């Protein structure tokens, strides 16, 4: 084989390899992904940014190597998972109790919008108003914390 024939053969191999590596756009349709632009447009899917996928087809017509299938997922959690869930529930319930106690303390101090004035606040009404605002913000934060802890408790099995 001559030098010129070798170059032509090498260029043909390189061109074939580059033709086999085709970049395609990837679209997300809810929890599914597709590279079919027409079906993505019909289903109103969104283009994944930076979603270029390069497909390299195997050289030769040989069969593909079999990939091992993942182990089936057990529908029931094992004992270790149950123990972790139980621990998580206990921790969340303890946190919920603390948050509810703190909210009760803040509500008692707030006294339906009329917290008891301290000696400094009698001379400085602005300090009293700032404390009332801080109490309201703290109560709102505690109520948000309680709601989020209850959501987490509801998510646990």
Image (tube, grey):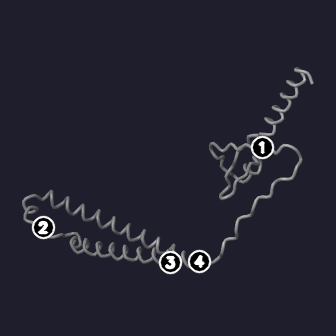
Residue 4 placement: quadrant: top right
The image shows residue 98 at horizontal and vertical percentages of 32, 74
Q: Are marks 4 and 1 in contact (CB under 8 Å)?
A: no
Label 2 to label 4: alpha-carbon separation: 57 Å
Q: Which of 152 and 83 is in front in this view?
A: 83
Give the mark, 1 or 3, whose residue is nearer the N terminus: 1
Q: Which of the numbered marks, if any, corresponds to residue 151? A: none
Callout 1 environment at 10 Å: few (<14), some (14 to 19), or many (20+)?
few
The image shows residue 81 at horizontal and vertical percentages of 54, 75
Label 4 to label 1: alpha-carbon separation: 40 Å
Give the mark, 2 or 4, whose residue is nearer the N terminus: 4
Residue at horizontal 65 percent and vertical 57 percent from the top: 30
Which of discs 2 and 4 lies nearer the camera? The answer is 4
Mark 4 — residue?
A: 78
Secondary structure at badge 3 equals helix
Give the mark, 4 or 1, whose residue is nearer the N terminus: 1
Q: Which of the numbered marks, if any, corresponds to residue 83? A: 3
Give the mark, 2 or 3, whose residue is nearer the N terminus: 3
Farthest-out residue, front = 1
Q: Describe residue 80's horizontal placement relative to residue 30 as left or right.
A: left
Mark 2 — residue?
A: 117
Residue at horizontal 84 percent and vertical 43 percent from the top: 59
Picture quarter with the N terminus: top right
Q: Which of the numbered marks, if any, corresponds to residue 56? A: 1
Residue at horizontal 64 percent and vertical 47 percent from the top: 48
Q: Tag count in the figure?
A: 4
Q: Describe residue 144's horizontal placement relative to residue 106 as left or right.
A: right
């Amino acid at each position: 084989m001559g030098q010129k024939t070798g170059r032509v053969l090498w260029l043909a191999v390189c061109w074939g390899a580059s033709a086999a590596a085709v970049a395609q756009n990837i679209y997300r349709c809810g929890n599914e992904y597709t590279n079919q632009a027409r079906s993505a447009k019909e289903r109103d899917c969104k283009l994944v940014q930076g979603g270029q996928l390069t497909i390299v087809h195997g050289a030769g017509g040989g069969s593909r190597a079999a990939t091992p299938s993942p182990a089936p997922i057990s529908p029931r959690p094992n004992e270790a998972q149950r123990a972790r869930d139980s621990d998580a529930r206990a921790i969340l319930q303890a946190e919920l109790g603390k948050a509810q106690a703190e909210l009760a303390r803040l509500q008692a101090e707030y006294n339906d919008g009329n917290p008891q004035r301290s000696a400094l606040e009698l001379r400085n009404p602005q300090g009293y108003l700032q404390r009332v605002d801080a109490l309201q913000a703290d109560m709102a934060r505690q109520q948000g914390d309680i709601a989020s802890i209850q959501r987490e408790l509801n998510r646990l099995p």
